[in-house]
Amino acid sequence: MDFEDLKNKKIKVGEFVLMTVPATIEYARDIFKIMQSDSKNMIFWMPDGLFASPEQTLVGYYNRNNSARCMLFGIFKDGKLLGEIGFSGIAKKSGKVEIGYWLRKSARGHGIINKLLPRIEKMAFEQDWCHKIQLHCDAKNIASKTIAEKNGYVLEGVIRQDGKWPNGLLRDKLYFGKLKSEWKK
Ligand SMILES: CC(C)(COP(=O)(O)OP(=O)(O)OC[C@H]1O[C@@H](n2cnc3c(N)ncnc32)[C@H](O)[C@@H]1OP(=O)(O)O)[C@@H](O)C(=O)NCCC(=O)NCCS
């Protein structure tokens, strides 16, 4: 399937449905609430700062859904949005994608990302142009680091003081990668 076409599909993976989160004010309110109620962890997902309002969330999702560099899928179970997983960076010309994910607090600790990651990897590596998946996380993000390690991603580097938190503190970033040749179909 053409990569871009995945954006408009509902993809079933076990008990979950992956689907682009529609840019509507109802979802924007839900997502804003999820982010605000767990800002301590959600800042790992949006290190430059969380959306300041449901309206800003709506604009953010509208722009993201229409961006060629991004393809994130809402993770739905029984109609409820649990989080997102997908491609937070698409660099077709250089043959790489970056994977990203988040879950609402109540959905964590059940291995959901571990279950969905192989399907996301398949979407990427089935594209002729894609030779590498990257996964970046903050050095303090133990959950994400563990996911990368358990799913066979190679730690390629630690970039020290790679950015700043909104409060000005410096942050180190871990760069993980998986090559197509390392992918177990
Ligand atoms: C990253 C995230 C999606 C992971 O959720 P999850 O898939 O439910 O993952 P878990 O909470 O089960 O954690 C994954 C693993 O890390 C381990 N882990 C998590 N926090 C840990 C901690 N503080 N110390 C030690 N181990 C920890 C878990 O035990 C689990 O290990 P296991 O596979 O052996 O059971 C979720 O934490 C999240 O949404 N975080 C905020 C957004 C974010 O950080 N996104 C990623 C940006 S790179």
Image (cartoon, rainbow, N blue to C red):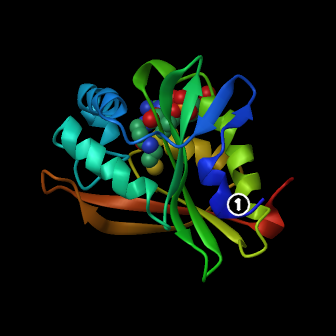
Query: Assess mark 1: CB under 8 A from ligand 1?
Result: no
- Residue at (78%, 59%) from the top-left corner? 1
Q: Which of the 4 image quadrants contains residue 93?
A: bottom right
Q: In the image, 32: left or right of 180?
A: left
Residue 2, image x and y in percent?
Answer: 73, 63
Residue 121 seen in this snapshot: yes
- Residue at (76%, 67%) from the top-left corner? 127
Q: Which residue is mark 1?
A: 124
- Residue at (27%, 27%) from the top-left corner? 33
Q: Which residue is more in the foreground, 33 or 24? A: 24
Q: Which residue is more in the foreground, 113 or 56? A: 56
Residue 17, image x and y in percent?
Answer: 64, 31
Q: Which of the 4 image quadrants contains residue 34?
A: top left
Residue 182, image x and y in percent?
Answer: 80, 63
Residue 173, image x and y in percent?
Answer: 40, 61
Q: Which residue is more in the foreground, 79 or 146? A: 79
Q: In the image, 106: left or right of 164?
A: right
